[in-house]
Amino acid sequence: MDKKATINDVAKVANVSIATVSRYLSNNGYPIKEQTKLSIKNAIEQLSYTPNIVGRMLKTNKSMDIGVIIPTILNPYYPAVIYGIEKKAYEKGYNILLCNSQRDANRQKQYVNTLIQKQVKGLIISSIGDDYLLYSDIVNKGIGLVSLEDEINLNKVGKVLFNYEKGAYMAVLHLLKLGHKKIAFLTSPLIRKSRRDILKGYINCLKDNNIAYNKVVEINEENEYENGALLGAKLLKEGDLPTAILAVNDMVAYGIMQYLTQNNISIPEDMSIVGFDDIKISKMMNPALTTIRQPSQKTGELAASMLFDILEGKESKKILLEPELVIRASTKKIRGEI
Amino acid sequence: MDKKATINDVAKVANVSIATVSRYLSNNGYPIKEQTKLSIKNAIEQLSYTPNIVGRMLKTNKSMDIGVIIPTILNPYYPAVIYGIEKKAYEKGYNILLCNSQRDANRQKQYVNTLIQKQVKGLIISSIGDDYLLYSDIVNKGIGLVSLEDEINLNKVGKVLFNYEKGAYMAVLHLLKLGHKKIAFLTSPLIRKSRRDILKGYINCLKDNNIAYNKVVEINEENEYENGALLGAKLLKEGDLPTAILAVNDMVAYGIMQYLTQNNISIPEDMSIVGFDDIKISKMMNPALTTIRQPSQKTGELAASMLFDILEGKESKKILLEPELVIRASTKKIRGEI
DNA sequence: CTCCTTATAGTAAACGTTTACTAATATTTA
DNA sequence: TAAATATTAGTAAACGTTTACTATAAGGAG
């Protein structure tokens, strides 16, 4: 296990100065004799030299990294977002430092800090949790920032948002049209703005249609899919069952569906259910899931493009993406309705 | 947008030397007067100083990064692996630099290079493609390496492998027991060792059971799910249909299932299908997918543990994980069989 | 042939840290 | 009270690069 070779070693072997080697590597048009080039090339090969980007970054302060913080990688929605980000980043020659906050505020703060220490040029964050100071600290350090959820009042911050409230409204309206009068909202902890927005849409739609029944079942874990079972159990225990469910996202919906099915409640015969996200596999579920489509990959691409715009000095903007209702087999007219 | 503060600025404001600030930050027991500590603390706050890890790394050569290269983030199998890796890495204080090779050899090589330049301490790679030189170059640079697929003959490389061949054998055997005599293998390009191993298991099982019929349908794209439709189409066009299908992985199986269903071939009535991976949602599919379970998260955890062992100077090992057949609803006795 | 330019290469400072030395006090020990 | 030690802090070199300056030689313009 040899020690890694440095530019000094290369210079020594090639019998030139390190400046020349550096110029050879940067390949920026500075004239170098062919013969010199050749001997440097040989030296590099012989030593299997790889430039140390740390040394370079220190000198040039030109990192080509951006940080991305998402809540969890286990919900396929986020990999799709990342895919979009990565696509744009790769085009621009940027690398991504990916962090999972696991929806833990401390862990997130820790990651933001680490990323700043690593001198990322920009940051794309899915929910920082309305921590104004953290946001402003980032932009004050000259780091580009795009938020995927919080509509923070800081004009230096780019925003790619989704109209969660409207999405929920559409979902509930769909269920009402199918004749459902008892609709419950089953959700992971309401600590994120997006979830609270969904709650708003749910409540508003019921109110607008003069429906008294409302039932919000919240769990205090953060395990998406596994939470489905917990939510299902809690729902059954509480009694006064709804005839339809709005789930906070597709993964949770799957968990609920599985739990209910195991407990002899069949979907959609006994219970309609609407998800949220429309992740790729949702059309293949059993039954295929009615859901609110959120354009995941596009969100990633837009966020990345916006970040690079910001890094190039352009104005930061705000984009609000609109929901789309995708009707599949997990919802049907309520029993007895024609 | 202020310039970022450095340790020099802090020292100046706190009216101490940079050495003292550095000692304060490293918090390693070197004695510092309480009063001095206080003024440094204040200075740091006032300047909202964040240490520059690049400077530190250059000096100490102690990066806390490991690189992870996976083929794609869109197949949920890999996020589960990453989750396992991250879990262990977080415990050890390591950060992960995640790269998607998109199953492109050049892109992968490029990423390996970038990661080396970034001075990662270790690398976990899912298939480097039998490039012995690339492997040995990595270990020769003193970088820890764990391979998730290639059984490269280099004892410095840790290996967490899966018995793909046996898994395929089990899958085919299951189908044979259900009375199927015409079983096809539908696969993405056979450029990866894992896929070729699955092919081996498929062929061997047929041979061992004196089945003449075999049909390998291969597509030359790398889009997993979308490939399902292409594979389905190719299968139908070729004629001499099988009664059962082994798919190279779950995602591809879903794509095939969807295509066939759309073309009035119902599963499992007209066609049985077995997947490979058992990603989390497979039990929720329509119909629930019979598949070969591969312990994704555990793979990640084992790989990370092994890497850290290697970094601590322990011997590198090889672990071979065994498959498990999970029988669900996508396979059934062939028509006419009792 | 002198002066200017071009091609080529080297010198040394700088980037933000850490840390081995050194130095100055304060405290203990004999 | 002198010597030894502990406490506290500063100086400067080093990590691997890049790059502004400087230097040399060679070729052209006048």
Image (spheres, coloured by chain):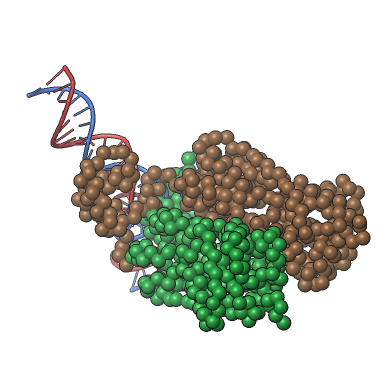
Chain colours: A brown, B green, C blue, D red
Pick out the residue farthest to the front: B240
The quadrant of the rendering that contains the C terminus of chain B is bottom right
Q: Residue at x 32, y 43 (%)?
A: A27
- Residue lying at 49% horizontally and 72% vertically, measured from the top left: B197
Classify B205 as above or below B69. below
Q: Is residue A243 left or right of residue B220?
A: right
**Residue B104: x and y, percent?**
46, 57
Image coords of residue B305 (percent x, y): 49, 71
Which image quarter: residue A275?
bottom right
Please name whichever residue, A172 or A23, is drawn nearer the observer in this view of the structure.
A172
Q: Is residue A145 above or below residue B75?
A: above
- The number of numbered discs placed on residues in the rendered structure image is 0
Residue A152, given in percent of the width and then of the height, sits at 66, 43
* Near-viewer residue (A119 or D28): D28
Q: Where is residue D1 in the image (x, y as percent from the top left)?
A: 32, 63
Q: Which residue is drawn at 45% across and 50% down?
A: B52
> Between B32 and A174, which is closer to the camera in this rendering?
A174
Q: Seen in the image, is A313 located left or right of residue A23?
A: right
Tell me, yes or no, if residue A209 can be seen here: yes
Q: Residue B125: in sight, yes or no?
A: no
Of residues C11 and A179, which is closer to you in this image?
A179
Q: What residue sits 37% from the left and 48% below the top?
A: A56
Q: In this view, does D16 lie to the left or right of A189?
A: left
